[in-house]
Every structure is written in structure tokens, then in C-alpha cells.
Image: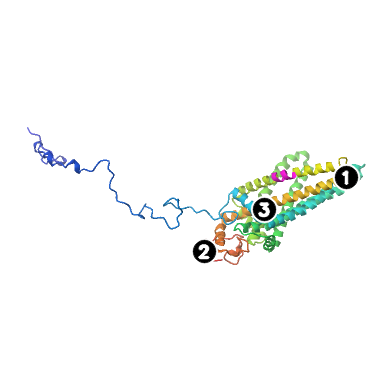
Amino acid sequence: MSQPQHGQDGVPGNQPAWGNQPPPGNQPAWGNQPQWGGPPAWAVPQAGSQGVPGPPAPGWPPGAPYGQPLYVAPPKPGVIPLRPLQFGEILDGSFQTIRRNAAAMFGSALIVQAIGAILIGAVTVGMVQMTSSLETVNSEEEFLQAMGPVFAVMAGAMGISVLIGFLGSVLQGVLVVPVARSVLNRRTGFKQMWTLAGRRIWPLLGVAALLTVGGLLAVAAVAGIAVLLFTAMGPMALFIVFPVGLGSVVLIVWIGLKLMLAPAAIVVERTGVYDGLLRSWQLTKNNWWRIFGITLVVAIMVGIIAQIVQIPASLAATAIGGVVSPHPDQDTVASTMVVSTVISSAIGALVGSVTFAFQASVLALLYMDLRMRRDGLDMELMRLMETGADPDGIPGAPSALPGNGQPPAGGQFPYIPPGQRPPA
């Protein structure tokens, strides 16, 4: 019995019989098959097609990655690059600003520090003389009479400290002018700085007085509460006074950092006292810890440098006094004390002027950095750099912005894209 012949899909009869297979000669020759291992003949892609970069544009830097987007760093026309800053760039920019505008920054700070040094030196000499006079007191009545001038001198010393703090707040706003101009590599002289800042001197005096009085009232309130608690509770009040005092210090530091950019805003943005305080509060929003860290590190650096310079100077003054008068009497001791105080005060004024100018530069660059982060000030500075507009003004001032040159409600200028800004 023969087997059925199966065809396609199992249909019988479509397959040839086993004996009727085609002869071997009808198979295709092996030589006509594609060569194994040979590369396929791909067509050469045209330049500029999808996935294939075209020829480099004219002026493409040699050695740059062909077909890759080229990174262009922000310009740095002055002491800092025109972008949000890092900590090292703030320090470097502060040193460069002082070096480029030494007469304006160092000279102004030296005047304020010299005034403070003279007053403090006079108070120190008076205090030493009054203290030596207490050695001749023989009764309680004489002691109370002698302590009256001593308390007066101590009150004078506190008043001098308040005065120096007040002048420091004013000078901080004035020194913003050379720092802002150095961002665009514009040097500032002593007269030009005070001319530009003098237009805002009354708001500067107002905000300095407000900050000084506010700080004094806060300290007085904490001290008054502590005195009342100790009077009412005795030594047990320490368990309440200590945490309250610590919390008060934290609160004062927090508010002080939030408002410390008000002088810069008043000078650069031409705001009033209230708008300057509000502007500082807005700029420092969500940046408090960063500002606190920078100011703390800078304060530690400045303190260490000041001590390194002043300690050898004080020892040298004492050694000179010992050589000049090895067996001093009362008059010689007083004279030596006066000479030592004068030398220490002069060195302290020089060191204080440098450190104050550096700290003021750091705060001014922090102000510029926060405006670049929040308001896009870097784009405005680029426009001023390209056009050269307002060469004798303060970069970032409202005169370069649209409108009437005054900030809107709230004291904050809105960010305007570069394409929508009017020409200078």
C-alpha cells in the first residue's frame, strides 16, 4: 500500500515524488552567494542629515568636540563672574575690590576707625587714671564718690561703641558703591564714591539709627527682664534667665541677618527706609543659613587676623615701656600707659579699617549675588557691559530699568527678560 503524498499545509498530492527530485545541477552556484565576513555595502550618509553633524560653523574653536554643543562661560568683566556666586568667589572678589579701590574703601574705613580709636583711647586712659586713684580711698563715702566718675566713663565707653556701630552701618551702605562698580570693572575714587552715596545719605542715616536703636532696645529689654527675675526669685531665676537669654540672642541674630542688607538696597535701588528693610527681608528669604555661614566664617577669619597683628604690637609696646623706664614711678607708669594706648589704638585703627572694608565688601557681594539669584541682575549687568550705559552710575540702580526709576510696591523690581528691556 503506497503512502499518500503530502503537499503544502498537509494537502496530499502537491509534493513531487521522491524519485522525481530536481537534479543537483539546477541548484545556485556557491560563488554567487554573498561573501561571509565581508562588510555590507552601506551608502555614505550625507552631511547634515539626521544624526550626522554638518561641517563646523566658521570660527569654531580648534580642538572643540565636533558636533557637540559648546559651553560658553559667563563673562567676568570685573571682580566676579556675572552669575550666582560661590563662597570662594565672594572672598576673592572682596580682596580684588579693596585692591582696585583702596583710596575709596580703605580711606573711608580708616577715618571711621580713627575716630573710634581716639575716643576709646581717651576713655581707656581716663579709666586707668581713675582706677589708680581708688587705691587712696580709705572710707566707703570716698569710694562712692570716686566710683561716680568711673561709672560716667563706662557709660561714655558704651556710648562710643554705639556711635561706632551707627557709623559702621552708614559706611556699609556707602562702600556698596565701589563694590557694585567693580563688578563691571569700573574704578571708583574717594570723591566719586561719596558723591554717588551722598544722594542717599538721609535714608542711610535713618536706617542706621533705626537698626542701632532697635538693637539697644532689644538688649535693654533682655537685661531688664533678667534683673526683675533675679530680684523676685533670687538665684533660682538662673534656670529661666539662661534659656530666655539664649533664645533672645538667637532671635536678635536672626533678625539682624535678615535686615543687614538694607543699607545696600537703599543706596543701589534708591529705596526709602521702610522699603530698604523690606527689600533686605525679601532678598534673604530662603538664604538665611547660607548668609549666616558666610558671615560667621568671615568674622572668624577677621578676628584671627586682627589678633595675630595686635597681640605682637601690644607686647612690643609693653617691652618698649619697660626698656625706657625700668624703675617706673607713678608718673612714669601713667606716661607709659598713654604711649602704649596710642600705639595700640593706631595699630587697631589700621587693622580695623582693613577688616571692616573686607567685611563690607563681602556683604555687598552677597547683596549682588542674591539679586542675581532672585531678580536676574546678571542679565542686566551683561546688558550694561555690552552697551556701556551709565558709566558714572551704580550698576543695578533703577535708572537702568524701565519705568520711572522707582521700585514698585513692596520695594522689589520684577525680573524682565533681556529681549523685553528697553535700550539704555
Toward the right, the furthest residue is 138
For the N terminus, which image quadrant?
A: top left
Helix, strand or loop at disc 2? helix
Helix, strand or loop at disc 3? helix
Q: Are marks 2 and 3 in contact (CB under 8 Å)?
A: no
* Label 2 or label 3, whichever comes before in sequence order: 3
Determine which quarter of the picture holds residue 35.
top left
Q: Is residue 59 magenta?
A: no
Q: Nearer the viewer, mark 1 or mark 2?
A: 1
Relative to residue 17, is residue 261 drawn left or right?
right
Q: CA distance from mark 2 to mark 3?
A: 34 Å
Considering the whole magenta stretch, tell me its main secondary structure: helix
Where in the figure is residue 77, as x and y percent of width and height? 57, 57
Local crowd size for mark 3, using a 10 Å CA cut-off: few (<14), some (14–19), many (≥20):
many
Q: Is residue 275 shown above or below 121? A: below
Q: Which residues are magenta?
A: 304-310
Which residue bears the numbered disc 1?
332
**What type is the residue that disc 1 sits on?**
Thr
Q: Nearer the viewer, mark 3 or mark 1?
A: 1
Which residue bears the numbered disc 2?
420
Q: Is residue 169 shown above or below 309? A: below
* Label 3 or label 1, whichever comes before in sequence order: 1
Q: Is residue 19 shown above or below 199? A: above
Where in the figure is residue 305, as x and y percent of width and height? 70, 45
Q: CA distance from mark 1 to mark 2?
A: 74 Å
Where in the figure is residue 225, as x and y percent of width and height? 75, 46
**What type is the residue that disc 3 sits on?**
Ala
Q: Is residue 307 magenta?
A: yes
* Label 1 or label 2, whichever comes before in sequence order: 1
Which residue bears the numbered disc 3?
360
Q: Could you tell me which residue is drawn at 87 percent across and 48 percent down? A: 148
